[in-house]
């Protein structure tokens, strides 16, 4: 088997359909608009985000998040992965009623469980969300810089690329960079090469997420 590394995964979006259905049953929610015949259903980026948000809202407790991380990394290991970096979202934690620290600790616990079973290594990239706003992104950066969790190694910004300008996020990335965190940002996912150029000019990341529209 070829050994693999996963470097771009949003942890809430990593919930497999069967896990989402199980969580929906737990919380009395109907997954049928978003999962049909064992697969997620969406037709454009907006409907994709709706399905993503539905799945995300089904993870509400520390046990839920530990289960999610354990489930996902264990499944990766079965496919030959030995390393995984996941994007985490303090905004999802707050929406679920958890502190960012409790959320991060729970994900770390799930990663530890998966490692104990399979040997897979996991790390976290704390992520701000563009369509939540600049202030929330800076709060995420401050959390990433001070949280001290040994598995938090980076900071990034994701979300709807059509919202906001890269220069709006410079301060957030300065906070993260000063703390010694790795820097990544989504660009060229929905927008063209100009978005990638702006990310390079304003953010100076070590890694671009997506970039597929750079050409």
Image (cartoon, rainbow, N blue to C red):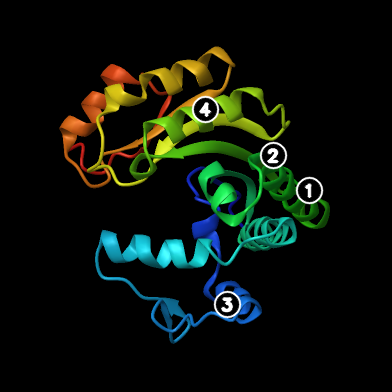
Apparent side of residue 140 relative to residue 106 in the rendered image (left or right): left
At mark 1, the secondary structure is helix
Gap between marks 2 and 4 measured at Cα: 13 Å
Image quarter where the C terminus lies is: top left
Apparent side of residue 166 relative to residue 180 in the rendered image (left or right): left
Q: Depth check: give the residue in front, 144 or 42.
A: 144
Q: Depth check: give the residue in front, 203 or 54.
A: 54
At mark 4, the secondary structure is helix
Badge 1 density bin: few <14, some 14–19, many ≥20, Cα 10 Å: many
Asked if 122 appears above or below 67 in the picture, the reply is above
**Precedes in sequence: disc 4 or disc 3:** 3
At mark 3, the secondary structure is helix
At mark 2, the secondary structure is helix
Residue 63 lies, in percent from the top left, at: 75, 60
Badge 4 density bin: few <14, some 14–19, many ≥20, Cα 10 Å: many
Q: Which residue is mark 4?
A: 141
**Precedes in sequence: disc 1 or disc 2:** 2
Gap between marks 4 and 1 measured at Cα: 24 Å
**Precedes in sequence: disc 4 or disc 1:** 1
Apparent side of residue 170 relative to residue 6 in the rendered image (left or right): left
Q: Depth check: give the residue in front, 91 or 51.
A: 91
Q: Is residue 89 visible?
A: no
Q: Are marks 2 and 4 in contact (CB under 8 Å)?
A: no
Q: Are marks 1 and 3 in contact (CB under 8 Å)?
A: no
Q: Which residue is mark 1?
A: 112
Q: Residue at x 57, y 67 (%)?
A: 58
Checking the image for residue 24, the label placed there is 3
Gap between marks 1 and 3 measured at Cα: 25 Å
**Precedes in sequence: disc 1 or disc 3:** 3
Asked if 103 appears above or below 176 in the picture, the reply is below
């Amino acid at each position: 088997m070829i050994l693999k590394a996963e470097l771009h995964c949003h942890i809430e979006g990593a919930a497999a359909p069967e896990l989402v259905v199980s969580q929906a049953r737990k919380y009395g929610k109907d997954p049928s608009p978003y999962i049909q015949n064992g697969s997620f259903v969406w037709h454009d980026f907006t409907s994709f985000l709706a399905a993503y948000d539905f799945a995300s809202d089904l993870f509400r407790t520390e046990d839920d998040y530990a289960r999610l991380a354990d489930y996902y990394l264990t499944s990766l290991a079965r496919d030959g992965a030995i390393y995984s970096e996941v994007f985490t979202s303090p905004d999802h934690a707050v929406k679920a009623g958890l502190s960012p620290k409790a959320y991060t600790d729970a994900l770390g616990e799930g990663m530890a469980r998966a490692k104990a079973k399979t040997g897979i290594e996991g790390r976290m990239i704390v992520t701000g969300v563009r369509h939540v706003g600049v202030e929330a992104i800076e709060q995420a950066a401050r959390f990433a810089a001070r949280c001290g969790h040994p598995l938090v190694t980076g900071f990034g910004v994701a979300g709807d690329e059509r919202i906001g300008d890269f220069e709006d996020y410079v301060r957030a990335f300065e906070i993260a960079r000063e703390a010694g965190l790795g820097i990544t940002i989504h660009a060229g996912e929905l927008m063209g090469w100009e978005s990638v150029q702006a990310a390079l000019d304003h953010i100076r990341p070590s890694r671009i997420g997506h970039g597929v529209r750079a050409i």
